[in-house]
Amino acid sequence: MMTTTVSTLAIDGGTKVRTVPFSTGRRYDDAERVLVNEALESQDLFYWSGTMTKAFCREASDHFGARFCTMTSSGTAAIHTAVASLNIEPGYEVITSPVTDYGTLIGLLYQNLIPVFADVDAHTYNITAASIRACITPRTKAIIVVHLAGNPCEMDDIMAIADEHSIPVVEDCAQSYDAVYCGRKVGTIGAMGCFSLNAFKHIGTGDGGFVLTNDEAMYYRNQNYADKCYDRHARGVRMTALAPCYRISELQSAAGRGQLTKLDGIITRRRRLGTLLTERIRDIDGIHTHRVQDHALSSYWFYMLRIDTDSFAVGRDRFSAALTAEGVPAGAGYIARPIYCEPVFREKSFFPGVWPAEVIAGKRYSYDAGLCPIAEEVLRTAIRLPIHESFSENDIEDMVKAIRKVGQAYRASR
């Protein structure tokens, strides 16, 4: 009878699959340097009177195929700006994903709106139309979809439900630059698309963000909300509403313009590497790949697979630690738990002493474990792997070798 030799894992003292770090290359070069210097030479770094932010808005609008673009100080600010521009009264509900960054929710909470969490698909990790439908009540006033890790949500089904109930959809595209759903770039399908220019995103300016829309009136509301309602367009609404200061600077916009020229290449490379990883591990029993639907294109901000814990002798944490020991930087899921399980939600400590939104609604809301069982299972079994445009195909093969080695060792030891 043939037997299979199982290599000793690095975590147990064996030889690593990979002994050198994965490189992320150089991000900034003359493309950004020339434009930043031009901004400095102008002696004017204020976004409205300078040239860089206006040019960045035009170029971003053209790239994504949207009519209007408003630059902001962060992706979080972009979402807050979009939500505020919907003019929803406090105490009403907004449906969104439980598998997301806090930044998706901060604007809702500051507007004294109530997050309602819809469950996700077990393999795309995005909220589903069916779960959204189950959450809709007469108090639902908006939906925020999160295209997680560059993977588009099923927007046709979601938009059909939204249109049926006359509910606007805001797209959180912080992780999904140039992701494509049925031939359309995400961020241009709903009422508004919000992007992040955080240092860790596909393109970055340290911090920053922007909101895309095809609705002219919504654009002016976005612009005013991001700039203290100073009404730079002189449309007669100066300081008529409460608004924060979410302005971007000319230096950030200059760097962003340079970054934008690289985006096509960044996405093409990440897409190739992410697809390759799926192709190379999809045959491993007990490993669930990060599913991208046939009518979609992911931009792979990261890659998240899941393990079937019944197939291995160890849980996700040990499996992930073993991959890291092999020289592959693996993370135990994207976030530790669904966002509603964090203390600020469990305790509803959004404001000192009382949550005004709940008082206005005249209704109590609970954020308890079990609210979105699929999301909880996803985050209990998920392993996050990096994808970067500077990686080679050999880097992906090292990831594959490590996954196969760890999977074989833990399966064999049962």
Image (cartoon, rainbow, N blue to C red):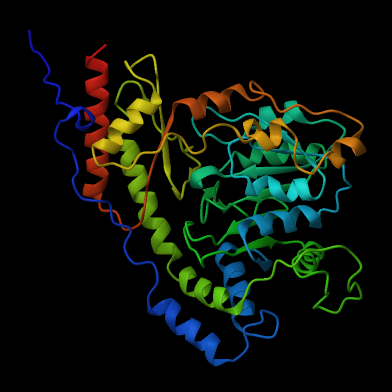
Question: Is 403 placed above or below 392 here?
Answer: above
Residue 153 visible? yes
Question: Is 166 placed above or below 212 here?
Answer: above
In-front residue for pair 150/228:
228
Give the side of residue 234 with respect to residue 287, left or right.
right
* Residue 302 image position (x, y, % from top left): 43, 45
In the image as oriented, which residue stretches furthest toward the front? 353
* Residue 2 image position (x, y, % from top left): 8, 12
Residue in the image at 64% along x and 78% along y: 54
**Total marks in image:** 0
In the image as oriented, which residue stretches furthest toward the left? 1
Give the side of residue 256 with respect to residue 236, left or right.
left
In the image as oriented, which residue stretches furthest toward the top? 1
* Residue 156 image position (x, y, % from top left): 65, 40
Give the side of residue 102 with respect to residue 243, left or right.
left
Residue in the image at 62% along x and 61% along y: 74
* Residue 331 image position (x, y, % from top left): 40, 38
Residue in the image at 70% along x and 41% along y: 159
Give the side of residue 324 with respect to residue 121, left or right.
left
In-front residue for pair 367/104:
367
